[in-house]
Amino acid sequence: MNRSADARRRHVENFERRGLGKKYHLGDPDVLFDARGIFGDRDLGSNVTFIKADFGHPTFGLPQTAFTELADDVDVIIHNAWKVDFNHSLASFEETHIRGVRHFIEWSIKSKKHSAIFFVSSISSVGNWSAGSTVPETPHEDYGVASQLGYGESKHVSERILSNASERSGVPTSILRVGQIAGPLRRNGGEWNKTEWLPCLVKSSLSMRLFPQTLPPIDWIPVDELAAIILEIVHDRARSNELGIFNLVNPHPTTWEPLVGPVMKRAGPHSRLVPTQQWVDALRQSDASDPEETKAKPALKILDFFDGIAKADDKAALRYRTENGAAASRRMKDLSAVRPEWMERWLDQWAF
């Protein structure tokens, strides 16, 4: 179910652009990704049906017969459709996104199979948790724990709605608080989007030959690992009626220090590490109105974001409990800390 009418075409184009037109294993023989098989051939049909949906509508804007057919058939709902915009207020998420969560609850209650809901939330829903303590895998009624942005607040409100639906109406609910998603580890698995903050930081640092000394704790999960983890959680939880909450961050956080080495090696012998605030100040000296400068130093486009990282250097970073994920997913349990060789692989994907 997609908000756009041309979702199939966009998926196919995105997959082909990212090199996902071939089969590859996510790690186990029973977890195989095959974009061609998923989207099918015009003559052979497809394993996926794309449906344009209006999440703010009680029946998602579908004809009643189509909605009834889905409600009779579907046993698992993975709700991963959300507007990612950190400049919008909480109220802007209400009509489509938060209301849509309520409509999925109604779907589950009325469906023949009592569809299990897996809500892909975000650690920003608890981003304002008191520093110095570990964020538990439990529901939180205190609105103040959400990061003070509409996006995080909307995820927090939706978690509370789902928690109440589980408690009061027995809706099978799992909440997946996803942290930083890193690039894939599989060589034919696509690439980490170059417009995200880390690729922007890396490219800008290579251009300046200056690198920040510190970043927040590295608790990233590669996207293909995360896909396999969520799949295992779905299989583990699909028939459970108890509320399950999962902080999906790397159980073994590491530091930036061992990861910046491979990047600096590519910059040459004259590159150097500087305090993160000094790195931000050096970046600020560049002309953000010059297209050539922003092309070479794309971090200029999100300078405020990096300024926030620099100012947070001395603050206690959040830590997360991850036992629920480790209990439900062997891949989560066995996941290692982010390694320098992973960074090498991402650099190769970016061709930096």
Image: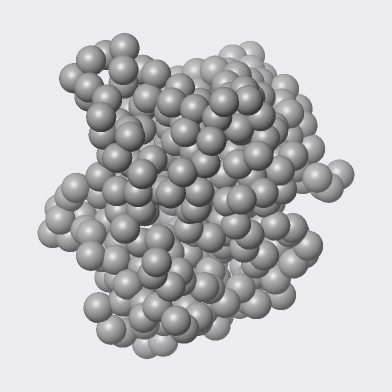
234 lies above or below 348: below
Answer yes or no: is residue 75 visible.
Answer: no
Numbered marks: total:
0
23 lies left or right of 293? right
Q: Which of 185 and 43 is in front in this view?
A: 185
Percent of width and height locating residue 217:
53, 60
Q: Which of 184 and 31 is in front in this view?
A: 184
State which quarter of the image contains the N terminus. Answer: top left
Percent of width and height locating residue 319:
52, 73
Q: Which residue lies furthest to the bottom in this view?
A: 168
91 lies above or below 307: below
288 lies above or below 214: above
Q: Nearer the viewer, residue 181 or 314?
A: 314
Q: Which of 259 and 174 is in front in this view?
A: 259
At 54% from the left and 83% from the top, the residue drawn is 242
47 lies left or right of 148? right
At 57% from the left and 26% from the top, the residue drawn is 270
131 lies left or right of 206? left
305 lies left or right of 121? left
At 79% from the left and 37% from the top, the residue drawn is 25
State which quarter of the image contains the C terminus. Answer: top right
At 64% from the left and 45% from the top, the residue drawn is 259
Percent of width and height locating residue 180:
50, 52
Percent of width and height locating residue 156:
32, 69
